Image (tube, helix red, strand yellow):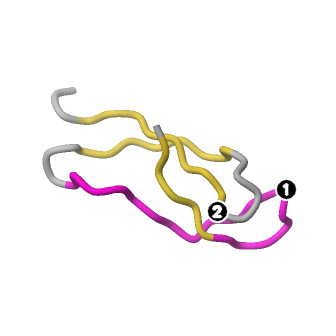
Amino acid sequence: MGNRIIITLECKDCKNRNYTTTKNKRITPGKLEFNKYCRFCKKHTSHKETK
């Protein structure tokens, strides 16, 4: 696997951790941020990488 790690994405509005994905730490050293659907807010919100 090398530099790929599993990360968790957290909704910025309700702070629930909804998604997991992988990233390459060497290529993407910063935190990832996506617009994804939150089933708790029932709308698309910004999701940011957490520990």
Q: Crowding near pointer 1: few (<14 within 10 Å), some, many (20+)?
A: few
Q: Which mark is residue 40?
A: 1
Left or right of 29, for residue 38: right
Residue type (three-letter) at the residue carrying disc 2: Lys
Which one is nearer the viewer's eye here, 48 or 24?
48
Residue 4: image location, x then y, percent: 26, 36
The residue lying at 38 percent from left, 42 percent from top is 22
What's the mark number on residue 12? Answer: 2
Which picture quadrant has residue 39?
A: bottom right
Which numbered marker is on residue 49?
A: none
Query: Where residue 13 appears, x then y in whole percent?
Result: 72, 65
**Relative side of 1 to 21, left or right:** left
- Distance from Cα at disc 2 to Cα at disc 1: 12 Å
Residues at marks 2 and 1 touching, judged by CB atoms closer than 8 Å: no
Q: Is 30 drawn above or below residue 44 in the view shown?
A: above
Is 41 in the magenta?
Answer: yes
